[in-house]
Image (cartoon, coloured by chain):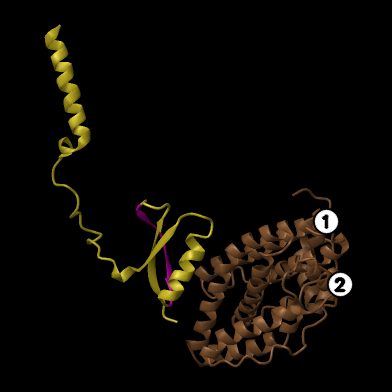
Chain colours: A yellow, B brown
């Protein structure tokens, strides 16, 4: 039997996102699903599984840093906004005194 | 629950447990030898399930006056076991292992489905638990059998040989024993061996006919004696291995 690699994604609870939990080799889709259940969800780990042939997943090149930001833009994050508000508050406080 | 004497209930519960234990032990012998690593993990998990089901029935038997589960497993000789002869046979090849397991799982499915309607609450509760896992076993073995049947000349031939061997001893699963009649009467066992047999035959035909596999007559009358404690040397061999460590020091604390 020629085997293919399948990636397994588990949903831990209704409404939660599916997260990759591992991979397995299987001769076909039916076997892949059967083994995925046995290997990844037999102890109540989750409520649903996705089993995907690895070759069917579109992926960015793993060795290129194409998704890494070129410059620091953390000021655009929500976190950055909170820091800005805090700074402004401190500044006003310093003026008032 | 009717006032059924414990000495009728006990051998029945022990026969249910022994089936699971002996098959579970055979399953466990594949650990590190299954055809692929994924199957190895899955099959070891099935082995644990079967032994776990055995423990549920042993505990219930203990509640009705039988020795502790550990004592039942490790301290009885072969003639005390009430399991079907079919289940003590060595694994042979993978095809035999899978074919036997599938047929046992179907038998177990019919039996536990009936136990859901038992007059004994503890048995109903066990049936619910057992069936939750047996669903996986049934699916697992069905997938394997379909693949072996359609896999190639060698795998198909092995499956056919295995089916002939298994079906020759199926009768032992539904062997009549003295406890069946009173249990049926009390509603503890809603389905007797007589009624399980045609259902089993029907389910097997449903599965194997579409694969054009001939299921030789399942009422061969082979493989009998197990429910009465008459076993083959295969069970003695299995018990030697199963009880070996316990026997080194029976008083050890684990």
Where's the N terminus of chain A, which quadrant?
Answer: bottom left
Q: Nearer the viewer, residue A25 or B32?
A: A25
Q: Which quadrant would residue B23 be assigned to in this image?
A: bottom right
Residue A5 is inside the magenta segment: no
Q: Position of residue B24 (x, y in %)?
A: 68, 68
Distance from disc 2 to disc 1, alpha carbons, whole Å, reads 21 Å
Q: Position of residue B147 (x, y in %)?
A: 49, 83
Q: Nearer the viewer, residue A28 or B167?
A: B167
Q: Can residue B43 be seen from the camera position used here?
A: no
Residue under circle 1? B64
Q: Secondary structure at mark 1?
A: loop
Residue under circle 2? B79
B204 relative position to A26: left or right: right
Choose the circle earlier in sequence order: 2 or 1.
Answer: 1
Where's the C terminus of chain A, which quadrant?
Answer: top left
- Residue B184 versus residue B252 in the image, above or below: below
Q: Which residue occupies 57% across, 73% down?
A: B138
> Which residue range is magenta in the image?
A17-27
């Amino acid at each position: 039997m020629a085997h293919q690699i399948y990636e397994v994604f588990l949903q831990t609870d209704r409404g939660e996102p599916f997260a990759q939990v591992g991979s397995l080799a299987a001769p076909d889709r039916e076997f892949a699903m059967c083994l995925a259940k046995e290997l990844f969800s037999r102890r109540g780990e989750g409520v649903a599984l996705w089993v995907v042939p690895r070759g069917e997943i579109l992926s960015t090149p793993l060795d290129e840093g194409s998704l890494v930001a070129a410059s620091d833009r953390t000021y655009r994050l929500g976190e950055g906004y909170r820091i800005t508000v805090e700074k402004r508050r401190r500044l006003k406080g310093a003026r008032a005194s | 629950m009717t006032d059924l004497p414990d000495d009728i209930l006990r051998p029945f519960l022990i026969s249910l447990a022994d089936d699971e234990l002996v098959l579970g032990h055979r399953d466990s012998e594949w650990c590190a030898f299954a055809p692929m690593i994924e199957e190895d993990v899955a099959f070891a998990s099935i082995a644990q399930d079967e032994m776990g089901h055995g423990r549920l029935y042993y505990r219930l038997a203990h509640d009705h006056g039988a020795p502790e589960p550990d004592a039942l497993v490790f301290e009885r000789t072969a003639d005390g076991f009430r399991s079907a002869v079919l289940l003590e046979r060595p694994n042979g090849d993978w095809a035999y292992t899978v074919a036997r397991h599938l047929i046992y799982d179907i038998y177990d499915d019919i039996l536990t489905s009936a136990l859901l309607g038992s007059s004994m609450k503890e048995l109903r509760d066990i049936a619910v638990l057992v069936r939750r896992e047996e669903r996986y076993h049934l699916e697992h073995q069905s997938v394997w059998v379909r693949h072996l049947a359609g896999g190639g000349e060698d795998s198909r031939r092995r499956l056919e040989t295995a089916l002939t061997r298994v079906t020759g001893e199926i009768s032992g699963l539904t062997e009549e024993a003295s406890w069946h009649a009173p249990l049926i009467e009390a509603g503890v066992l809603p389905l007797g061996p007589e009624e399980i047999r045609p259902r089993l035959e029907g389910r097997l035909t449903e599965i194997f006919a579409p694969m054009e596999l001939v299921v030789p007559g399942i009422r061969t009358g082979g493989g009998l004696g197990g429910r009465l404690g008459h076993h083959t040397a295969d069970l003695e061999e299995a018990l030697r291995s199963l009880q070996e460590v316990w026997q080194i020091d029976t008083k050890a604390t684990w």
